[in-house]
Every structure is written in structure tokens, then in C-alpha cells.
Amino acid sequence: MAEQAEIGWPTCEQAGCIGIRLAAARMCLAHASEEETADALKLVGETGAIDARGVSITPTLLERILTAAPRRKKKPLIKGCRFEQATFTGDAQFGEVTFSGDARFGEATFTGLAWFDRATFTGDAWFNQATFTRLAVFGMATFTGDALFDVANFKGPGYAQFGKVTFNGKAWFYRTAFSGDALFGGARFEQARQFGPLLAAGRLELDDVQFAQPVQIEVSAAGLCCRRARFPSGVQFRLRWARVVLDDTDLAAPSILAGIPAPSEEILAGRENEIATAWQRLPAGELSERPQLVSLQRVNVAGLGLSNVSAADCRFAGAHNLDKLRLESGVSFATAPSQWGLGGRRWGGREVIAEERAWRANPDRPPGLAAAGPPRTGRGGWATGSPACWTRGRSPGSTGRCARDARTSRMSRAPPTSTTARWRCVAPAHVATATPAISLARARGDGWSAAS
Ligand SMILES: [Zn+2]
């Protein structure tokens, strides 16, 4: 049979079945007689190895396999398994299983829950081109060897959970697609230098992750949430579509966050086109092909450069080393409305950050300050509402203090001694002073740096 030649193993004689024959039978593990199955499972118990390539595996059969397997700390120990092209027809419960050899699930299909919570893979784990049609849970799993999820398709509408996973080897998520959220919160990547390119119709969560090596992360997603993350050797984000939150992340090492014009892989570009149709139906401004940076609060941006992103809604409160933040090409901010202000001076064209915009649109701000600034309402005014943002709201008092400092600085005739000094002269949350700093750099047509 042509199929057999492509499949590469002797197949079961059951019509339409591509399961590998048992060594002492003409059928696969799913279709063999009870006696033949019992003999095969006895062998699993003796060797710890299982070859079920192409086999259709019910939850009952999987339970029998795991029950027959040797034990380690009272949990199943699989010393090498081959489940390539196997179909798990119900929930696949591999929780706390130890895979001491290579675990091969390439092109396998999980029609129910794929449960690998706290599993341990001491060899390489192959999930390349696997299809997960419902939830996939790898929470707190440990991958000592390489973890390969290349071209895997997480089709479940909910999420794929990789929370607190340890990847000691390479972590390949090349051309991986997630139909929901991809959750990697708390994961540790010891060797990975590349993450993606991948596609997530929902959000990619990288909260509390740590990448020990310099890493390039390429993703098309509705959102990227990367709070409290650590990139001691630097990170290069290559993003599309995403609204991005980086709160409390340390970006002191040379790093860049850039919007890219197209996915680097054609197969992802096609999938992205399908999903983008839904993204584009969101209210205007929610998502755009160019990523939107929405929060850098308390981020150490000493090594960070931005390129081709919108920062119009970005919050900077408490960010550190803002004088070292590099604004490269294609970084945009909101623009102040053109209005007549104090002393007949015309305002307009100045780029402003989200905090200032929110403060000026706030009807509860102190009236004494309002008199010197542009009008709060009216045609072309500031009352545009709070910027769309994922971040929590700030108290009127704190934003008032920010803006007071900003205004005091702006109204002073004396030029600032340096951008650095301006940043250091304000309390941590007083990021509204970014406004004059940005304006100064823009007016000179150069980047925003300590030297400007
Ligand atoms: Zn069969």
C-alpha cells in the first residue's frame, strides 16, 4: 500500500487503521485480541518502552498502558515512547508521568484534553506538528532535553498552558499556532535563543518568565503580556498586532521592541490573515497591524530601543532610565490638540504621553492648574476620555502631581540642564515630564537619549 510506504511501519490489518502492528500480532494495540494486548502491556511493564505509532488510543487503553508501565515515585515511568501520528480519542492523562527517554508525539492528534501537568521529560520531547483540539496543559512540566513544538497546532478555543514550565534545553515553537491564549507565565528558558515565530489569536503571556540566553521572540498576537520578566542577556521582540504590557520587566541589557511588516514565515502569514479579519472587526483603535505599546510602568528601559510601534497609549509611570530609552524609526505618540493657551500662546503639535493626556482630560484635576493649560473640553480639546489601556487607573492626586511638575518645568524660561537631570528631579511616578523631553528631542530631529 502507498500509505504504508509513506508511514514507514507495518500497519494493522484493520481496514483504515495506520496503527503499528504488535510484534507478535497482525493488529495494532487498539485492535488486537485481549490476549495479544495483555502480552504487549506485559512487555511495556518489563521494558518501560511503548511503540504506538499511528494507533487510535482511547482513555481506557492509555490508562492500561500507564498502569502497566514501571514506576518512579509511584508514578508511571516511560522509558521511551513513540506516539507519532497516534490519535488520542479522549482525554490524554499524562500528568506527573516521567518520560526518561525520547518522547515522540510528532503529528499526534489530541481530540480531548492533553494533560501533561508536572510531567518530566528527561530526553527530547517531540510534539512537532501535533494537533491539540482542546485544552493543552503542560503546567510545571520539566523538559530536560529539547522541547520541540514546531508547527504544532493548538486549536482549542481556550488556552494552552505552559505555566512555570522549565525548559532546560532548546524550546522550539517555530511556526506554532494557538487559537486561544498561549500562557507561559513563570516559565524558565535556559537555552532558548529563539522563541517563535508563533501566532496566538489570543494573548501570549510571558509574565515572570526568565530567558537565560539572549533571545529573539517573534509573535503575532492580540496581546503580549510580559510583566516582571527577566532577560539578563537581552531580548529582541519582533511583533505584529499585539498590545504590549511590559510592567516591572528588567530591560537593562541591550534589547529592542519592534513592529515588523510581515511574519517571517509564510505559513503563519496565511493563518494570520484569517485571524486578522476578526481582529479588524474590533472597535476602531483596539488593534492594528503595528503593535501598540500600552505600558512600561516600572520597567528598567536602560537597554531598550523602540521601532515601528505606537506609544500613544503607553503609560510610563515609575519607569527607570527613561533617558536611555532609544526611540528609533516609526515610534509615534499622541499629539496635543491645537489650542490658544496662556498669554496668547498657541499650543499644538507637541507629542504627549498617555499620562498627560489622561490628566488633562480629567475633570477632577485641580482648577488652578487647569487655568494655565489648554482647555479641557471643546472642539479639539483634551477631553477624549482615558486612553484605552490595560493598566490600572491612577489616583487623581498622583496624576496631578505629575502634571504639576511637568507644567512647572515647561513654564520655566530656564532650559533644562540635561534630559537626565530632568528625569532625576522628579519622583518615580512623575513620568509626565516625559512630554518636554520628547518634544525637545523631536524638535532636534534626533533620537531620545541622554545626549540629546
Ligand atoms: Zn489497528
Image (spheres, rainbow, N blue to C red):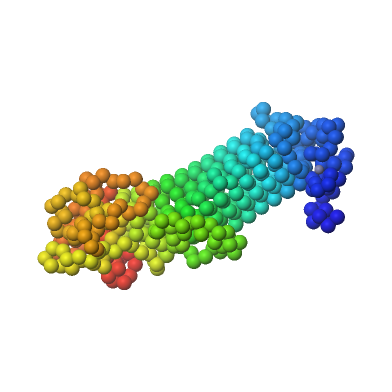
Give residue 307's position: percent from left, percent from top. Answer: 42, 64
Near-viewer residue (386 or 445): 386
Task: Specify the farthest residue to the top.
Answer: 74
Give residue 355's position: percent from left, percent from top. Answer: 28, 54
Is residue 395 something that shows in the picture?
yes
Task: Answer left or right for 212 relative to 24.
Answer: left
Give residue 133's position: percent from left, percent from top. Answer: 62, 46
Task: Answer left or right for 199 relative to 148.
Answer: left
Near-viewer residue (280 or 9): 280
Where residue 116 sits, quadrant-wise, is top right
Quarter the C terminus occupies: bottom left
The residue that appears at 60% across and 57% down in the rendered structure is: 175
In this rendering, the answer to whether 189 lies above or below 94 is below
Is residue 449 something that shows in the picture?
no
The residue that appears at 53% across and 41% down in the rendered structure is: 164
Quadrant for ligand 1? top right
Quarter the N terminus occupies: bottom right
